[in-house]
Each structure stands twice: as structure tokens, then as C-alpha cells.
Image (cartoon, rainbow, N blue to C red):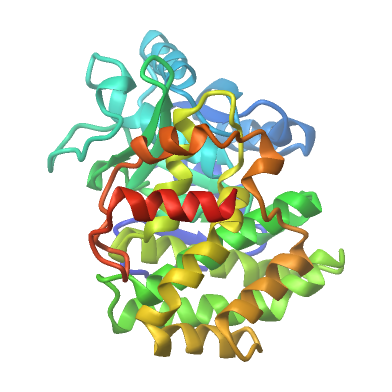
Amino acid sequence: MEIDLAVPTRVDFGQGVFDRAGSHTRTLGGHALLVTGRRAARAHGYLDRMVASLESAGVRVTVHDRISANPTSDEVDEAVALARSRGCDVVVGLGGGSALDAAKGVCVTAPSGGTVRDLIGTTLAPGTPALPLLAVPTTAGSGSEVTKGAIVTDTKRCFRAGIRGDALFPRIAIVDPDLIASLPRPLLAESAFDAFAHAVEGCVAARADAASKARAHRAIALIAEHLPAALRGEASPETRAGLSEAALLGGVNVANVSTCLPHRLQQAMGSVPRVDISHGAGLAILYPSWLRHTAPLAPEAFAEVAALLGGTTIHEAVGRLLASAGLPLRLRDHGVDKDDLSRFVEGVTGNLDNDPAGQVTRDHLYTLYAESF
């Protein structure tokens, strides 16, 4: 099923569309660099299926399966070197948001002749050369398959930030809900909360508009309807489709209206190399404090979110969601020391005034971290 969304990416959505990857890629190039994570895609058979689909369509394949949960500049540059040496003219990203972000980094770095470190923290100029990308998510959370950003950690500067620009939009995205059937419960919960955060922030961001709010409400309703069954291990095809659609809609909102402070704060955790908290888990830890300070600034919008979740207040509704998903609530339980909080604050980059609080002070950022500690 082709879905027409407010992004330039062509989206093929539905059960079984994964096996069309080869024919889609063939329209983009003849030699694919397949970028994926270190274990899951191979363990669940998706890597072999992707290679078979590409080769059956006449596409040559070079595999790079060395991407970690928070992709680093070293990993992306290694993939770039492989793409250049093998003459790859198209990139296929297969996996969660980390693999897709790494694949995007490859796409814009390979033609540049430089390193991805030159691009981290920048917004690319219109017309920046990029290899075409086919994005295939195997989780239902990041929405990276339809966004124009990629988060990568610069290992030399101990700096995690985004590369942004229209050149990062995948040309084609294949969203097959069957691919999330193999997700373990913790990763399912973290991914769903990432999608939920995109939806909430699509309602309350300064750039939010009627279209983003409609997409957000649809995504939140889908999560409220389908996540409980998925967490119980009772995911039906309809449930998987609902969660995949919610993630896709959240990604469209990220592309069009961006995100709020929790995303800036979570990304900055990459400024301390020994801290390794997944994106979804980091957001879950930060959300209660952010809501405490932010809900009074947009009471109607947050009340609508609470009602969609079946709660009376946003604090009660999100607290119940976090508890049911078994998501973490404290930074201190994940290797964070109190001294790390100031380093986190210094690592915060990107647009801060899209938050309902507007342009906030560094003291406010520290307070959010400290309350989440």
C-alpha cells in the first residue's frame, strides 16, 4: 500500500511489503551498501531476506553490519570507506532508528570526500549531494524512515548531535509491520514511547499546526489501543500495523514540526561516553520532569493527550503508561553520576525555542536533568 504523506519520501506500507525491497532498490541504483546493526537483523533472518531480495532484482550487495545502538562517527566512516571502495551507488538502511540514522550519515558523507564528523551538528545546504537511500525500519518508534535528520556521536569530540537537511530524506521507505513481531518486550516498549513522544511534541511544539496535531492524535490513539496487547505478547497483525502507523506518523511530525526539549536533552547524554542509554529509555526518564514544568504552559493540548490515553491528567496518564511498559524512571539507575549533569547541559544543541517554554536557560535544563536523576 502506497501512503501519501507530507514528506518527499515514497512510503510502501503493509504486511509483506518487505519482499519488494529489491525491486524498489533497483529503481535507485545497481550496487547497494546494506547498513544494519550487529545482531538483530541477522538473528531474525531479515538480513538474509534483504540480500536475497536485492540480488533477485539484479542489485549487487555489500553488507556493513557493524552499527551499534547509538551510532558513532567511527562506525559511519567505516561504512563510508566501504561504499567508496566498492563503488556503491545506493544505500539500504535496515534496522531501528540507529541503523537508519547511520545509513543517512553514509548517504551524505560518501559523496563529500570527507568524514561524517564534518557534518555532525550542521544543517546541510539545499542541493547537498547524497546517495539515494531505501529505509526499512524493523522497530516501531523512531520514524527515521521519513525524517530529514540523523543523530550520530562524534567520538573525537564526545559530542552527539544531528545532521539535518532535505538530503537526508530517504527516497523510499518500506514499512512492513511484520518486522516488529520479533521485538523483545523491552525494545518494543522503548520504541513505542519514542513514537509517543514524537506525537506529544507534535501537539505542543511552537511549530505545531492543525495537520501535525491531527497526526499526533491519531498516533496517540493507536498507541493507546494497541500497545497494551503488544506488551502482553498478544500482538495481532492489526496491532503491529497500528504501532507501525503510529511510528510513521510521528516521524512525519518530526520532519515537519520538529521536537521539543526532551529530545535535545536525551541526545546530549552522548556527551559522556560511558553513559549508554537508549533513545526511548532516555526520553521515558526525562518525560515526568518535563511534563511537570511544561503542562501548565499548554493545558488544553496536554489535556487532549491525557484523554486519548484514558487518563484524567497528563501526569497520571503518562505515569500509567510508563509503569505498564516497565520503562525506567531515574538516570542514576543507568550509570549516570550527579557530576555528569553539568556535562549533559553543556552538550545540549539544536533548536530550543520550539518547546512550549520557549528559549530556556541553562539552569532550566539542569533542573530537568536533576529532577530526572
Identify which residue, 238 or 367, lies in the foreground. 367
Q: Is residue 203 left or right of residue 20?
A: left
Q: Is residue 29 visible?
A: no
Residue at (44% x, 42% y) in the render: 267
Q: Is residue 146 left or right of residue 285?
A: left
Residue at (72% x, 71% y) in the render: 227
**Which percent across, then down, holds residue 148?**
32, 49
Tell me which corner region of the image, top left, top right, bottom left or bottom right, holds residue 132.
top left
Tell me which corner region of the image, top left, top right, bottom left or bottom right, holds residue 247.
bottom right
Q: From this view, report whether residue 66 is shown above or below residue 301.
A: above
Q: Is residue 65 left or right of residue 292?
A: right
For the image, the number of numbered tags is: 0
Q: From this view, report whether residue 140 is shown above or below residue 212.
A: above
Residue at (23% x, 59% y) in the render: 359
**Which percent across, then down, holds residue 276?**
61, 32
Identify which residue, 85 or 244, lies in the foreground. 244
**Which percent across, then down, holds residue 135?**
48, 45
Residue at (69% x, 81% y) in the render: 225
**Which percent across, then down, holds residue 28?**
36, 39
Q: From this view, report whether residue 73 is shown above or below residue 146.
A: above
Q: Is residue 18 visible?
A: yes
Q: From this view, report whether residue 331 is shown above or below residue 352.
A: above
Identify which residue, 167 or 75, lies in the foreground. 75
Toward the left, the furthest residue is 126
